[in-house]
Amino acid sequence: MNIEQTARRLRSREISAVELARESLKTIQAEQPRLNAFITVTEETALDQARRADDDLAKGIDRGPLQGIPYALKDLFDTAGIRTTGGTKIFTDRVPAADCTVYEKLQAAGAVLMGKTGLHELAYGITNNNPHFGAVRNPHDPSRIPGGSSGGSGAAVAAGMVAFALGSDTGGSIRIPAAYCGCTGHKPTYGIVSRYGCMALGNSLDHMGPLTDTPRDAALVMDAIAGYDSRDDSSIPTPAGDFWRDNFSLRGVRTGIPENFFTERLAPEVAAAFHAALDRAKSAGAELKPIRVPDPEALNVIGRVILMSEVSALMEPYAHRRDEFGPDVIALIDQGRLLPATDYVNAQRLRRRWQREWAKVWKDIDILLTPTAPIVAPKIGQATVSLGEHEEDARLATTRLVRSINVLGLPAVSIPLPVSGLPIGLQIIGPPFADNLVLSAAGCLA
Amino acid sequence: MTDWKILASLRCPDIPADAVARIAPSLDALEQTFRPLAATLTPTDESAVTFSNLQERAE
């Protein structure tokens, strides 16, 4: 389901918002037993909002391209009166009293909420094998993970249940499900989409953003959800409606191709798809520039120290309820509780140093291309993956190429590459606030 | 090298010993990669997270 095309159908009265919502509900009903993408389906809310969208359109009130479009929110975006669980037993019955900023903005844009999608518990993991709400499954092969932690959002978009979904990305959690499920996922520059009213995982690493069919659609969602919010201390003023460059071309775009780290230890099918993408970029006029980037492996380590410390600080009041957490999540919370405060502070100091080093990278290139993940979606329950002679933890392999970008707060989008087997993602990274550049470049490569 | 078992018994006695034993290898690996990085820090290295009064001014 594509936002641009659907918005045109709505405005030509080819279909109504209520009919669209009913179609979406029908697809959700059909796919939910296979994929378990949703924790809560908000049928009444959806039909109410769809009726309002139709009424407004009939009165000539046009709220923009998202009006009447069915979408879903990861179940950590607070929705007043609608249960928001964070995918954890601890908050199974939590019903927020107020909406998060993003949901307020999407209501103002006239979009139609179909439900709340499944996630890895607390968004703290990438499998979405959730012990409390069941495993979310990959639409391309239900024996495999959808990637996470926004796996329900990725599965819902890829299976055509909704036109777009919102996710959060703390160490790759939007881009990974986009890559494994075969859709577009955009992690915005840190601070341009409000985190207010979203259940935090790692405050200084959390980014909210869209999963969509196309990069153009991601830009349309960004137009609606971005903007300064005084209730979010990390919020930064950004120009509204500036996430897409019409008639953009890759001609002359200095396109960095990493010589180190991002092209190491790739599954053969990922390496082949990535190199084919580089050929397409070159054919489209991009100026390919091999480049060595400041050690992302170190950034991954720094990111893990920051994340574990921040999560454990947040979850400290609940840590004594050990048996209510999944075993993987309580193990991570335990680890964070044992890290000294000096490690956290030093990790934030190292982060600032790496940020300065990476700022130099953008003097030589405009965008950086990497695979999103070095592997295709693992099987549910698969603990390790073989990469040549290396045996690697499947979770660490999955986050290896994306986590560092959260530490830097850079905009990055994952788009599906044209492959015949399981989906493979291409990651396009840019300097801070170049969200419109990475999205427009993604549009040329999609 | 940190003795995670002793540390946990002092700081987080609610974490069972068998749970500490399971996470110790991960913490060891993290410590081995993180400490050499931290050792390169100098007094002029500021934190990425700094206190600011800008929010107060905005309000």
Image: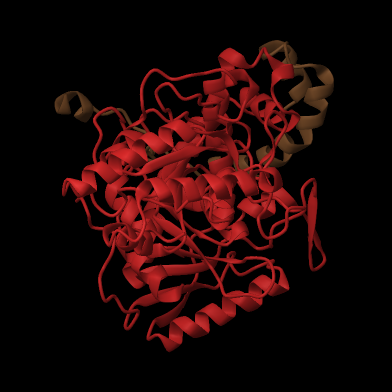
Chain colours: A red, B brown
Is residue A59 found left or right of A344 in the rendered image? left
Q: Residue at x 70, y 11 (%)?
A: B10
Q: Is residue A100 above or below residue A415?
A: above
Q: Position of residue A299 (x, y in %)?
A: 53, 50
Q: Which sits in the foreground, A301 or A48?
A: A48
Q: Position of residue B39 (x, y in %)?
A: 55, 41
Q: Is residue A253 above or below residue A78?
A: below
Residue B46 occupies which quadrant of the picture?
Answer: top left
Whether residue A365 appears in this view of the structure is: yes
Q: Residue at x 69, y 57 (%)?
A: A377
Q: Which sits in the foreground, A361 or B37?
A: A361
Q: Position of residue A168 (x, y in %)?
A: 48, 42
Q: Position of residue A400 (x, y in %)?
A: 62, 54
Q: Residue at x 69, y 23 (%)?
A: A325
Residue A412 occupies which quadrant of the picture?
Answer: bottom left
Is residue A248 found left or right of B35 in the rendered image? left
